Amino acid sequence: MALFKLIHVLAVMVWVGGIFFAYVVLRPTAAEVLQPPERLRVWDKAFSLFFNWVWLAIFLFLTTGFYMIYLFGGLSHVPAYIHPMLMLGLTMVLIFIYLFFRQYVPFNLRVARQDWAQAGKILASIRKLVAVNLTLGILTFAVAILGRGM
């Protein structure tokens, strides 16, 4: 079980840590240093690389999470704090799937066409969804840490 917990936590750490870096460090730096076309290209490339890691992280934390629930004997036998963790994690996944297919794919196409105005509008929408997932990710860590002590 320890190996599955390690993989689970590392996968979540990659995703939430990456969101934190992008939102708190890269976003303000890119806005200050780069002009819109270059900034949008940087975001497009950063998303392209990061989202590959996110898909892997989602696969790993869902697989390990559901396997650990199975090892406990199902949802009715897990500690109570697992339920909100599961709800928050699945909500984050659904937001990411929406963000990827309904926001990032059109953003990527607009950047490729050099449609900077539309790409900028989509990026603003992506930023809001990223902020929601960052908040949910931090809340999930809090539930995991505080829940164990209860």
Image: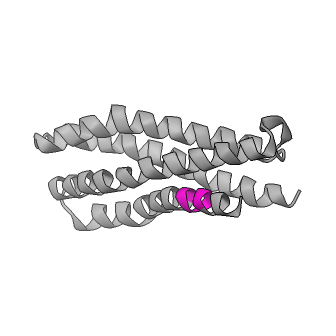
For the question of whether residue 65 can be seen, the reply is yes
For the question of whether residue 117 can be seen, the reply is no
> Within the image, what quadrant is residue 66 found in?
top right
What kind of colouring is applied to the model shown?
Answer: one colour
Q: Is residue 139 above or below residue 110?
A: below
Q: Is residue 29 above or below residue 102?
A: below
Left or right: residue 35 compared with residue 76 = left
Q: Is residue 8 magenta?
A: yes
Q: Residue at x 29, y 57 (%)?
A: 46
Left or right: residue 56 compared with residue 50 = right
> Within the image, what quadrant is residue 23 found in?
bottom left
Q: Residue furthest right?
A: 150
Would you say the magenta stretch is mainly helix, strand or loop?
A: helix
Q: Residue at x 29, y 63 (%)?
A: 30
Nearer to me, 25 or 96? 96
Please state, as top left, top right, bottom left or bottom right, where the N terminus lies in the image: bottom right
Number of numbered markers: 0
Q: Residue furthest left?
A: 113
Q: Position of residue 120 (x, y in %)?
A: 25, 44
Q: Residue at x 49, y 61 (%)?
A: 14
Left or right: residue 75 compared with residue 87 = right
Q: Position of residue 5 (x, y in %)?
A: 67, 59
Nearer to me, 21 or 120? 21
Q: Position of residue 25 (x, y in %)?
A: 41, 67
Task: Write down the region rendered in magenta.
Answer: 7-12
Please state, as top left, top right, bottom left or bottom right, where the C terminus lies in the image: bottom right
Left or right: residue 79 compared with residue 49 = right
Q: Residue at x 13, y 43 (%)?
A: 112
Q: Is residue 82 magenta?
A: no
